[in-house]
Image (cartoon, coloured by chain):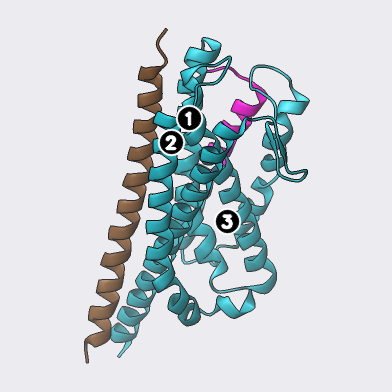
Chain colours: A cyan, B brown
Amino acid sequence: MHVFANPARFLKIARPLTPILGWSGAALIAGALYVGLFLAPPERLQGESVRIIYLHVPAAWLAMGGWTAIAVASLMQLVWRHPLAAVAARAVAVPGAVFAIICLATGSLWGRPTWGTYWEWDGRMTSMLVLLFLYLGYIALSGAETEKGGEGRITAIFGLVGAVNLPIIHYSVLWWRTLHQGQSIDFLRGTSTIDGSILWPLLASALGFSLLFGAIVLMRMRAELASNKVEARLKRMAAE
Amino acid sequence: MSPWPFIFAAYGIAMVGTGGLTLWSWIAMRRAEAQADALGRRP
């Protein structure tokens, strides 16, 4: 990991990797959503509304995965002072927040025909809403700290502390059995209660959105590194 | 209740959200890198 902490080395890898991740992600999403929307069968109890699963579940995984990445990058920033760690954490925050919004919106639209309500203060939904607020707080805090010329240490601590919400989201369906359904896929045991005809397009969609998420993060990191370069150059020119 | 309006609304939100975010990030990256390149070429 230390090898990639050098911005020049990172850019050498990120430049060719960005279009590869972006285009392969877009192609996989298009294929998976076409299968999910038109070819996959309706679910036995939920009927056609199960087709929202191909958006809702990947968005939820990426919103949680995004904060995991922020927490790891924050730890690297605080412990090893990696120059790229803060840039990476900031680059993840906006896409993470967007996927949290998509998760909440699609979940709400799935809930209305399935449960008869758009919203319930259920453990899973509430903890996911808290994650969105954490993202918004992180974005505001990192913007304020950058503006003041800080190193981003307070933002990094916030990124680490906010990770406490991740196990709460994960275990909420076990701790508070209310409206949201329980866990259907167990990656640790490699088991799933979802039928293969629905599971495979779901996994393809999740992989596609993950690749696109990676491309977006790389684009945002490249933009920030280029802006930092411009700022440093302008400061040097003003000093000469 | 027909689920299709909800399904199409969900797909619309997801597509507009991810498409808009991708386009915004790409434009911001291109603009920042073009500015850095232009400044780097100046003597």
Q: Amino acid at mark 2?
A: Val
Q: Secondary structure at mark 3?
A: helix
Front position among marks 1 and 3: 1
Disc number for residue A40: 1
In terms of secondary structure, where does tag 2 sit?
helix
Examine the rendering and report whether any part of residue B21 can be seen: yes
Spatial CA distance of label 1 from label 2 is: 6 Å
Element class at badge 1: loop
For badge 3, the amino acid type reads Thr
Q: Are marks 2 and 3 on the same chain?
A: yes
**Does A55 sit above or below residue A21?**
above
Q: Quadrant of the C terminus of chain A?
A: bottom left
Mark sitting on residue A35? 2
Residue A235 versus residue A130 in the image, above or below: below
* Chain of the residue displaying label 3: A
Dot label at residue A155: 3
Label 3, residues with CA under 10 Å away: few <14, some 14-19, many ≥20: many
Provide residue A24's location: percent of width, then percent of height. 41, 57
Amino acid type indicated by mark 1: Ala
Does the magenta portion include A209?
no
The reply to the same-chain question for discs 1 and 3 is: yes
